[in-house]
Image (cartoon, helix red, strand yellow):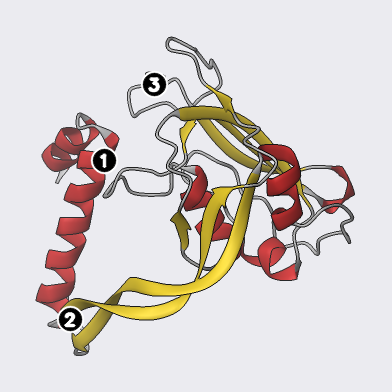
Amino acid sequence: EDSVVVELQKLPRNQSAERYSAMVQSLLADRFKLRSSREKKDFPVYELAIAKNGLKLHESKPGDAYPNGIKDFEGRGHGKLLRIEPIEGGQLRLIGQGIPIVGPVGSGPPGSLMGVLTDVLGRTVMDQTGLKGIYDFTLQWAPDQSQAATLTGPEGTKPATDNQSQPESSGPSIFTALQEQLGLKLESTKAPVDVLVIDHIERPSEN
């Protein structure tokens, strides 16, 4: 209803995301008789840590303003920017301004470096950096075919690709770029990951 939309637009981003999630869960339970549960399963993951040569991230200063940053429903700036864009040579560039390494739980689409890396790599990325601040950074790399085909970027970014074929790219992999440009490294391992299990579902009821 219009009144619900207006109410949601007045909420902070994380609270509105939680409300949307609850509404969708209620709809699925009503229309599809969906019952689900969560459990831990061991999966391949990446651990994000500080590289041996040291951190190269620039910590944002209090009061930094980014006029091109993300805006809310009423056009008010959030003072941050997170965007992935294609550049010459078939490479991708991730621009972050005022962005944390790890985003808050329940904040909706990824608004952190770790969230973007999880999307790009198609594998859960876990934080081992211990970094609690917010940072400005630019990361430039040559995506492999799976990244170029599936990457769309977090809310507030524009898609990195379209339906056209992508040019062959040359440049560092995202693993090399992270070490050389940001002083971070990704290490492959296995760890318990929170997964959603569908316990029961039926054909949807009529509208």
Q: Amino acid at mark 1?
A: Asn
Q: Which residue is tagged 2?
A: 32
Where in the figure is residue 182, as x and y percent of width and height? Answer: 66, 39
Q: Which residue is tagged 1?
A: 14
Q: Quick one: SS at disc 3?
A: loop
Residue farthest along the top direction in this orientation: 63
Residue at horizontal 40 percent and vertical 23 percent from the top: 78
Do the CB atoms of the residues marked 2 and 3 lie less than 8 Å apart?
Answer: no
Q: Is residue 43 above or below residue 91?
A: below
Residue at horizontal 24 percent and vertical 32 percent from the top: 12
Report, in whole angstroms, how far the alpha carbon at label 2 lies from the one at label 3: 37 Å
Report, in whole angstroms, how far the alpha carbon at label 1 lies from the one at label 3: 17 Å
Q: Amino acid at mark 3?
A: Gly
Is 130 in front, or is 159? 130
Q: Is residue 46 above or below residue 43?
A: above
Q: Quick one: SS at disc 1?
A: helix
Where in the figure is residue 64, as x and y percent of width and height? Answer: 49, 12
